[in-house]
Structures are given as C-alpha cells and as structure tokens.
Amino acid sequence: MTPTAPSDNPGALAGIKVVDMSRLLPGPFCSLVLADHGARVITVESPRYQKEGFFFEAVYRNKEHMTLNLKSDAGREILLRLVADADVFIEGFRPGVADRLGIGYGVLSAENPGLIYCSISGYGQSGPQRERVGHDVNFLAAAGVLDLIGESGRPPVIPAVQLGDIAGGGMNAAVGILLALFERTRSGHGQHIDISMADGLLGFLMPPLSQMQASGRRPRRGDSRFSHRYACYNVYRTADDRYIAVGTLEPQFWEALCRHLGVPEYVELQFDETRRQEIIDRLRSLFAARPLAHWKREFDRLDICCNTVQTMEEVLEDPLFRERDMILDTPSGPAVGVPVKLDRSPGAVRTPPPAFGQHTRDILGELGYGAERIADFIRRGVV
C-alpha cells in the first residue's frame, strides 16, 4: 500500500503543537505517535548531532525539523518563542541538564502555563540513580526483565528491538501526554510528566510477579509457563533451520496439536513435571523432520496457536500487514504504518521524514525573524 492522508481528516490531534527536543529513539518515537495522528511536531536538535549517525529517519515522518544551539543566548530566545504557543514540550536530557540550559519546566511553564512538559530519562527525575547513564540493555537489566529473556542455563538474551526505548519510554510518554492533554481540558493547566524507561519496563513484570506470588518460587529464565518450560509454549527448529512458534496454552489447542502430530498420549500431560523434557524432546524431533513450508501448510488449515517465525523480508510482504496498511510503500522503501486505527479520525503518513534541519529557515520566519537575522544566526552557529 502507498501512504495516503485522508483529504477531509487532519487527524485526532490536529491543532496540537509539539516541540520535541529529544533525540535517539524514546522521545522521537513518542512524538511520532502524536505526529501520525495530526499533531504538528517540530523537532529541534543541535547542529552537532548531524555527524553522530543517530538520526533514525523512520521516526521523523510527519514532522518538521530544525537545528538550534541552546548554548547560545540567541538559541534560548528562539526556543522560548517556539514554545510560547506550544501545547507539548518533550525533552530527553539527563535530569538537571534542561534546568542548566535554562529550559527546565519552571522556566517554560512560567512563559506558557498550559504547557505539558514531558521529560524522558533512563531512571527518572528523582531517586538515587537519576543521573546514571544507560541504554536499553541497562534499563532492561535494572528492571529485571533481561534476566527472564532466553533459555534456561544460558545467558540472558538482548532483544533485537529496543523494548525500553519504545515501550518503556516512548509509548508511556505518549500515553502520559494524552492524559495530560485531556486533564487540561478540565483544569486549563499544563503539568510536568516524568517518564523513566526503567519504570516502564518494571510494569512488564506484572505477570511473572503474579506467578511468583502464587507459586512461592522466583521466576527463572526460560523456566515459566510462558517461556520454554513446557512443550505447549515453545519454539521448534524445522528441517531447513527455520523455526515454528507454538503457543497452545489452552487445553483444546494443545489436544489438537498432539493429535495432529500423532502423539495423543501427551494430551493429558501438558504440564506434567515428570515428563516435561520428554515431551519437549519428542516435539523437537517431530518438527525437525520437516521443512518450514510443510508446517506452514499444516498450520494454515488448523485452528491452533502455531505459526512460522517470520523473517523481516517475509513480514514486509505478508498480506496480514499489507491489507491492514501496516506496510507502506514509500519512495525510500517499505515503511511501517499507523498501528492505532481510529475510524472517524484516522492517523496517516502525511509527509516523509525531513532532512536534518530542513525546516529551520521556515520556522524562524514564522517566529518573526527576517532574512538578515536568520542569515546572522546561521553565520554565528546559533542554528
């Protein structure tokens, strides 16, 4: 599918102005969610970031981009003008840095009392580790999530997608901003949102925490009902070195799988501890005897929770995502669509990612700066 914006619908957040001073992934992913649904997002980054190679183009679609040097008085003046009529401000500095730059919540909210100010950091704005540096793997480790990912007896496995950045940080920040926007319709006031990526990941532990409280034993890596311990919820290699994901937790699905594989004797032994490894080994041998294509044909006609582990290339061509506009064809290649589907005010991919600093001159012009002043800013390295 090709991205198209509804001609008669600007999106649920049309009229909302967001100034995003974050970088890398958590903040830009948050503002991507807002931009996809119609908010005007102006991304502001220091000119020096252009050379660092961390400009993830995909999360800048539907946004405008300008450069700004906040270490100059002129740069701070420009930012204050930019934020004067903004609804949302997002920053991802280490706690305390925004205040030292003169753009903390106290300063900006004094200029704009209705401003919703969202801070995204690794460990939060308070607490003993507020100034600690980190990346996704560190937040996963601190929250206890990394210890649970992988197979029993093997080292923890680092996910290939940034769970802390995207889910712990970006998604929670978007939820917080939407909550604050809703509350502002009643109070008329903005507020400060404190998003910790480690906090967000800690929320992932609700299921294993419940299991620990029920069983009295600490969850261990690869040793839970939802992680490799039992044959009914596991991953199996095929004859051509591909993989099948089996999630037959419910008894009826487990029974259907056992009967289809010719091992009906295991139907009543789904969670039997004494024969647990025997059943896993037997299913491993059965799946390893046939190639992936065989199992795909089999499972496509069965109503059970089994499917192939798809590669990135397969996902990009999958009718499941194509027909739901989740894979879009763009001039620069395939792009991910908008996952939140609203029927009256749908989100859309309206504009491609901008070049670094592409809109700097236009935005400065909107703020009332003339051509000579803009040229002076560029000459002095303000933008």
Image: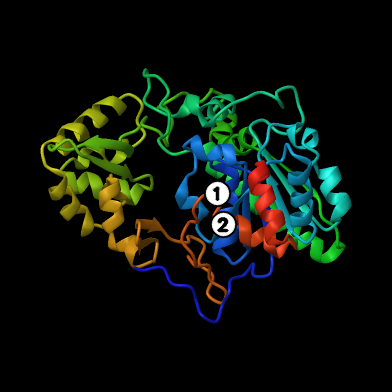
Q: In this view, does 249 lie to the left or right of 33?
A: left
Residue 29's disc number: 1
Q: Going 38% across and 66% down the picture, which residue do you hit?
A: 324
Which residue is the site of mark 2? 33
Is mark 2 in CB contact (under 8 Å) with mark 1?
Answer: yes
Q: In this view, does 74 lie to the left or right of 228?
A: right
Numbered disc 2: secondary structure:
helix
Q: Going 42% across and 37% down the picture, which residue do you hit?
A: 226
The N terminus - image quarter: bottom left
Q: Where is residue 165 shown, x and y percent of the image? A: 55, 39
Q: Going 76% across and 26% down the picture, which residue do you hit?
A: 127
Q: Going 59% across and 41% down the picture, which residue do you hit?
A: 47
Q: Residues within 10 Å of mark 2 (few under 14, many from 20)?
A: many
Q: Can residue 227 be seen in this view?
A: yes
Q: Number of callouts in the render? A: 2
- Residue placed most toward the observer, 46 or 298: 46
Vertical position of residue 127 compared to residue 43: above or below:
above
Numbered disc 1: secondary structure:
helix
Q: Where is residue 312 shown, x and y percent of the image? A: 30, 47
Q: In which quarter of the image is residue 87?
A: bottom right
Q: In this view, does 335 lie to the left or right of 198?
A: left
Q: In which quarter of the image is residue 45?
A: top right
Dot 1 amino acid type: Phe
Q: In which quarter of the image is residue 359?
A: bottom right
